[in-house]
Image: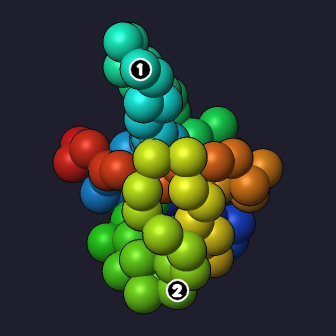
Amino acid sequence: MKCSVPNCDNEAFVEVRLYDIYPQIQVLDIYDQEDSTCPYLCKEHLAENEAGADGERRPRGKVYYPHTNRNCAQGFNIYRKL
């Protein structure tokens, strides 16, 4: 598996997940899906992605990343080690 950042040939280190929590009065709903805009990152791009993150990691918040979440979905990234 290769890193999904354009022109990167490094082996992927993590799978990128888009994650959000929808707190309702009686029901808690969780959104957890693979980031189709950049599903895999190598160690180098993972570090860059987190260092360049801008926003609040909170339910219904929005975080902008240099490499992932290119569709600007609400929520934040979580990573699963491969």
Q: Measuring 78% from the left and 50% from the top, which residue is drawn there?
A: 71
**The disc labelled 2 sits on which kind of residue?**
Gly
Q: Which residue is mark 1?
A: 25
Q: Quadrant of residue 54?
A: bottom right
Residue at the disc numbered 2: 52
Whichever of callouts 2 and 1 sits on the residue coming sooner in the sequence is 1
Q: Nearer the viewer, residue 72 or 10?
A: 72
Q: Mark 2 and mark 1 in contact? Answer it, CB < 8 Å.
A: no
Label 2 residue SS: loop
- Residue at (36% x, 80% y) in the render: 47
Give the percent coordinates (x, y) of residue 6. 70, 66
Given the current orientation, which residue lies at the most extreme right position?
Answer: 71
Q: CA distance from mark 2 to mark 1?
A: 34 Å
Q: Report the side of 78 relative to 41 (left or right).
A: left
How crowded pointer 1 is (Cα within 10 Å; few <14, some 14-19, many 20+) is rated as few
Q: Looking at the rendering, which quadrant does residue 82 occupy?
A: top left
**Foreground of the two, 44 or 74:** 74
Q: Does residue 63 appear in this view?
A: yes
SS at badge 1? loop
**Residue at 63%, 70% in the rendered image:** 64
Give residue 70's position: percent from left, percent from top. 74, 57
Label 2, residues with CA under 10 Å away: few <14, some 14-19, many ≥20: few
Q: Residue sitting at 63 percent across and 76 percent down?
A: 66
Please identify the residue farthest to the left as the structure is shown. 81
Q: Outermost residue toward the top? A: 26
Location of residue 63 (image quadrant): bottom right
Relative vertical location of residue 15 with respect to residue 46 in this rendering, above or below: above
Dot in front, 2 or 1: 1
81 lies left or right of 72? left
* Along the line of sight, the residue nearer the viewer: 8 or 45: 45
